[in-house]
Image (tube, rainbow, N blue to C red):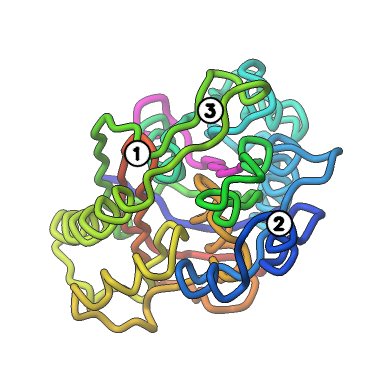
Amino acid sequence: MEGLKLIATGGARPGRLVTNEELSKTVDTSDEWISTRTGIRQRYFCTPEQNAATLAIEAAQQALERSGLSPAQIDCCVCATLSGPTASPSVACQVQRALGLPENRPAFDVNAACSGFIYGTAAAHGLLTTLGGRYALVIGCEALSRLMDPTDRSTCVLFGDGAGAVVFELSSDTVFAVSLGARGDDAIRVGGPNPSGSEPIQMDGKAVFRFAVSALPLCLNEVLGKAQLTLDDLDWVVCHQANSRIIDHCVRHLGANPAKFYKNMDRFGNTSAASIPVALNEMAETGLLVPGQTLGCIGFGGGLTWGGMLLQYKGVKQ
């Protein structure tokens, strides 16, 4: 089976930096309370001029430029988000217009919350293999600050805004495997089909933790089994950046090397569908990703949904 290689990344960081200390001025919390329970020390919120679509366009433009491809070479555009500014046009369609992607190619959004980037990548792989084509643009973007209750300590300290984008190449010479799952449960809930005027994010933290520490190793082992690889064969594992305690718990459960598990929630918080591509972009920009490396990516969150994939980094000059 042909798989996907990661060839370029892009990112967009919102304009407002929000530290734990700033949040402690408006809710009953502290930097110590937040950081010891989540690993988060800061996050970024959109300015009034920014939203999930503007961030997606910025990240996608950067990924496209870094790939060295022209807009005409992109065969599909899939955007993972639960916080687009409008239900229609989709964020992907706004990216298509802004970047001048061909009009005779598919562009659409997927909503699988924190697993959205994995779902979107699987969808892009299916489009390339069924409709034909070689290159896919997959984006994860969120403006979760627009969906939060700023007085709810259980959620307002967790989430941040951001976008990451990846250009994938269909290849027969690569490691690739995908696993997806879902179990209807409102342990994480965002009300209403449109972010404007909907009820804010609500979350049962204990239930989500129990789900995540079960789903993460299960999903990772499943994709490793599909590819007939072991954890030792992976250079990096990039999980959804929800909570450092979730990742640490799973590392201990797996008996794994913690250095393989990339973490950046201390700087970005939980950006839902954006968290994995934001991490991949940061890793590429800082030189942690090296051509030929094999990556495992694991998402888990609202829905409840989970997803994992294995792929190789081909890379271009960042």
Numbered mark located on residue 155 in the image: none
For residue 44, the mark is 2
- Residue furthest toward the front? 28
Amino acid tagged 3: Asp
Q: Is residue 267 left or right of residue 178?
A: right
For discs 1 and 2, the disc positioned in front in the rendered view = 1
Is tag 1's residue or tag 2's residue first in the polypeptide sequence?
2
Residue 176, given in percent of the width and then of the height, sits at 30, 54
Write the start and end of the magenta stretch as one range: 128-142
- Mark 1 vs mark 2, CA separation in Å: 24 Å
> Of callouts 3 and 1, which one flags the residue occurring earlier in the amino acid sequence?
3
What residue is shown at x 54% (from left), y 66% (from top)?
265
Near mark 1 (Cα within 10 A), the count class, few <14, some 14-19 or many ≥20, is some
Q: CA distance from mark 2 to mark 3?
A: 23 Å
Residues at badges 3 and 1 in contact (C-beta under 8 Å)? no
Number of marks drawn: 3
Q: Residue furthest right?
A: 49
Q: Amino acid at mark 1?
A: Ala
Q: Looking at the picture, how far across and down is residue 263, in whole percent?
A: 48, 71
Q: Secondary structure at mark 1?
A: loop
Q: In the rendered structure, which disc, 2 or 3, sits on the residue that comes first in sequence?
A: 2
Q: Secondary structure at mark 2?
A: strand
Q: Residue at x 57, y 33 (%)?
A: 200
* Residue annotated with mark 3: 109
The answer to whether residue 265 is left or right of residue 208 is right
Q: Say few, some or many: other residues with alpha carbon within 10 Å of mark 2 (under 14 / 14 to 19 / 20 or more).
A: many
Task: Give neighbour class at mark 3: few <14, some 14-19, many 20+ (Cα, 10 Å).
Answer: many
Mark 3 vs mark 1, CA separation in Å: 23 Å
